[in-house]
Image (cartoon, rainbow, N blue to C red):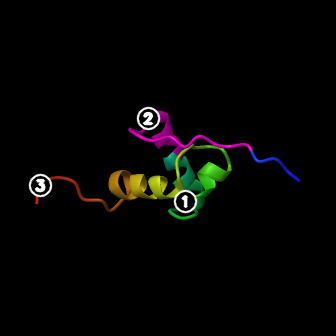
Amino acid sequence: MEQLIPIEIKKGPWKIEEDELLIKHVEEYGPRDWDLPLSKGHLQRTGKSCRLRWLNSYQPNLKKGEF
């Protein structure tokens, strides 16, 4: 039987390097397959965390500023 290596999931503030990896993932695969960065070992964040980071910070049609 294959032994699985536990992956430590990061919590808390995102680092610039993590944001860059997330943006690179979206450029390559589009805004989907959010569990892929973790499964490939690129990011130690959950798919949900990656998706929320993209939607709340980097989504192209995101409007920022006053209402």
Magenta span includes 30:
no
Q: Residues within 10 Å of mark 1 (few under 14, many from 20)?
A: many
Q: Residues within 10 Å of mark 2 (few under 14, many from 20)?
A: few
User: Mark 3 or mark 1, which is nearer to you?
Assistant: 1
Q: Are marks 2 and 1 in contact (CB under 8 Å)?
A: no
The residue to which callout 2 is attached is 16
Per the image, label 3 sits on a secondary structure element best described as loop
- Looking at marks 2 and 1 on the same chain, the residue that comes earlier in the sequence is marked by 2
**Residue nearest the viewer, comparing 65 with 53:** 53
Q: CA distance from mark 3 to mark 1?
A: 30 Å
| Amino acid of disc 3 | Glu
Q: CA distance from mark 2 to mark 3?
A: 25 Å
The residue to which callout 3 is attached is 66
Per the image, label 2 sits on a secondary structure element best described as helix
Expressed as whole percent of the image width and height from the top left, the position of residue 48 reads 47, 58
| Dominant secondary structure (helix, strand or loop) of the stretch shown in magenta | loop
Please give the name of the residue rendered at 49% of the width and 39% of the height, measured from the top-left corner.
18
Q: Specify whether 62 is left or right of 27.
A: left
Q: Are marks 3 and 1 in contact (CB under 8 Å)?
A: no
Q: Is residue 22 above or below residue 48?
A: above
The residue to which callout 1 is attached is 34
Please give the name of the residue rendered at 82% of the width and 47% of the height, measured from the top-left corner.
3
Q: Are marks 2 and 3 in contact (CB under 8 Å)?
A: no
